[in-house]
Image: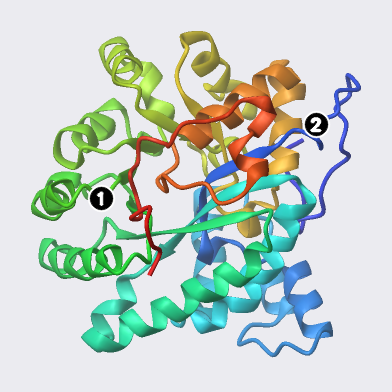
Amino acid sequence: MGWQQGSTVRSPQSESGMDLQSVPKVELHCHLDGILDPEMLRDLHERGVELALSAETLARAYPVDNFEGFSRWFDVQKAFGGSLDAYRPVLSAHAERLRGQNVVYTEIMVAVGEILRSDWTDFIGRFRAFREYADELERGDLQIELVAGWNRRRSAGEGDEIAGRILMLYEAGLIAGVFLAGPEEGNPVLRFASAFARFSAARLPVEIHAGEWCGPESVWDALEHGRPRRIGHGVAIFEDPSLLKLVRAQGIHVEMCPTSNARTGAVRRIEEHPIARARAEGLTFSINTDDPGAFGCTMSGEIQLVAETFEFTVADFERIARDALAARFQPELHYSNARTLTGFELQPGPGGGLRPEARY
């Protein structure tokens, strides 16, 4: 089903014989610190890349089949983090996996809470170097954008300080947007209202994880106090007809993560995931892996899972890819394979992320 140990791409055809591998794919919701898996670590080690985490240590954190398991996995791999430079080989390996799945555009979420401990001038230089490294990985066929954000558990004061630095990254042309993640219960977006007001004034595109582990009130809170253009997960949207109507009317894009939601208990079982409802209601939404290292999923595997569980067709996946690309935070598309996705010339997305004239 949706579970794959490691990230080996599943068969390119569904049980119905549909060619899903050739469908262009767009991913908007993938965390940089959620990519690592034991297979990737072993491959990197065989290439001579020394990392601060062994494949054997990470393997002991599996299976990730509930929220507690995810927290345990995250705590294990967290020992690896703290430095963007450490993630260079991880991003490189991830880019090659995406290329093999015909992913043409991806936005990678980078948690920047650690910048509170960095020198104000140094963190811009380090982030610029990482952005330049991502540029080198694109190779003319895969566009990689970075979205910076933080966890809801932080205090309002920390949020304000992080917001200031995120705005510096944006003004430097290094990020396409901002996100807020983490457990919703007890951590409302309201706490960070002043930070999101600054983002709105700067026209910085916003994504907020909401309606994942809490009810519709979580999404209402996000919409009122964060004014996001995209909602991450959003499974609870469908519990409130008024909220569903508003999300549809305003064209708010919902980043859906089927395997992740089933693994962490946001939905009880994959068959209860609201992605089919999103299609029926005419929402703009995408299919994403969230944390492919933790949940052992891939973009190819996710669309195969959705095809087999909910009878989505190639035409459905082509429309989903177009909707995802239209919801991107970077207005400029660099490569023709994304600009002409499935034969349709696309207009710039609504995000208005990086300045079109220059990245740096």
SS at mark 2? loop
When asked about the image quadrant of residue 188, the answer is top left
Task: Say which quadrant the C terminus sits in.
Answer: bottom left
Residue tagged 2: 20
Q: Is residue 198 left or right of residue 64?
A: left
Residue in front for this viewpoint, 232 or 285: 285
The mark found on residue 204 in the picture is 1
- Which mark is on residue 233? none
Residue 330 x %, y %: 42, 48
Residue 161 versus residue 247 in the image, above or below: below
- Amino acid type shown at disc 1: Leu
Q: Residue 118, position in %: x, y?
A: 28, 86
In this picture, is 310 found above or below 280? below
Q: CA–CA distance between discs 1 and 2?
A: 34 Å
For label 1, the crowd category at 10 Å Cα-Cα, with few meaning under 14, some 14 to 19 and many 20 or more, is many
- Position of the N terminus, as image quadrant, is top right
Classify 137 as above or below 98.
Answer: below
Residue located 60% across and 87% down the image: 52
